[in-house]
Image (spheres, rainbow, N blue to C red):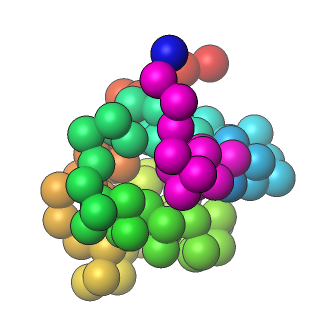
């Protein structure tokens, strides 16, 4: 298993320690599925997402609310698929 950079390791920890199991699955599962393909821009997008309120991100992921413009795009579409959540 490759060693994560400190920045990725911090993002992984923040993704899997949100405070609710549902948020952990969304953030953590998304991180686990996609982080190996991220460049600087994609990682910055995810770090910004981690700074948002869990209830907002979950609403965007479930498409019960529209995501703000700064989060629109391919990564948000991948987040909305929810095919990375395994329980």
Residue 69: quarter of image: bottom left
* Residue drawn at the location 76% of the way across and 48% of the way down: 17
On screen, residue 33 versus residue 55, left or right, reads left
* Residue drawn at the location 43% of the way across and 61% of the way down: 46
Q: Position of residue 68 (x, y in %)?
A: 34, 82
In the foreground, 85 or 1: 1
On screen, residue 49 versus residue 20, left or right, reads left
On screen, residue 68 versus residue 69, left or right, reads right
Main SS, magenta region, reads helix
Residue 11 among magenta residues: yes
Q: Position of residue 11 (x, y in %)?
A: 57, 54
Residue 56 among magenta residues: no
Q: Position of residue 79 (x, y in %)?
A: 36, 48
* Residue drawn at the location 64% of the way across and 66% of the way down: 55
Q: Which span is picked out in magenta?
A: 2-13
In the foreground, 81 or 12: 12
Examine the rendered structure and indicate whether residue 45 appears above or below residue 61. Answer: below
* Residue drawn at the location 74% of the way across and 54% of the way down: 18
On screen, residue 37 versus residue 46, left or right, reads left
């Amino acid at each position: 298993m490759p060693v994560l950079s400190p920045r990725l390791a911090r993002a992984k920890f923040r993704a899997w320690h949100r405070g609710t199991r549902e948020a952990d699955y969304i953030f953590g599962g998304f991180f686990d599925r996609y982080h190996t393909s991220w460049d600087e821009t994609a990682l910055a997008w995810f770090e910004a997402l981690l700074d948002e309120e869990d209830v907002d991100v979950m609403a965007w992921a479930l498409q019960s609310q529209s995501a703000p413009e700064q989060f629109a795009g391919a990564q948000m579409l991948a987040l909305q698929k929810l095919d990375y959540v395994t329980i």
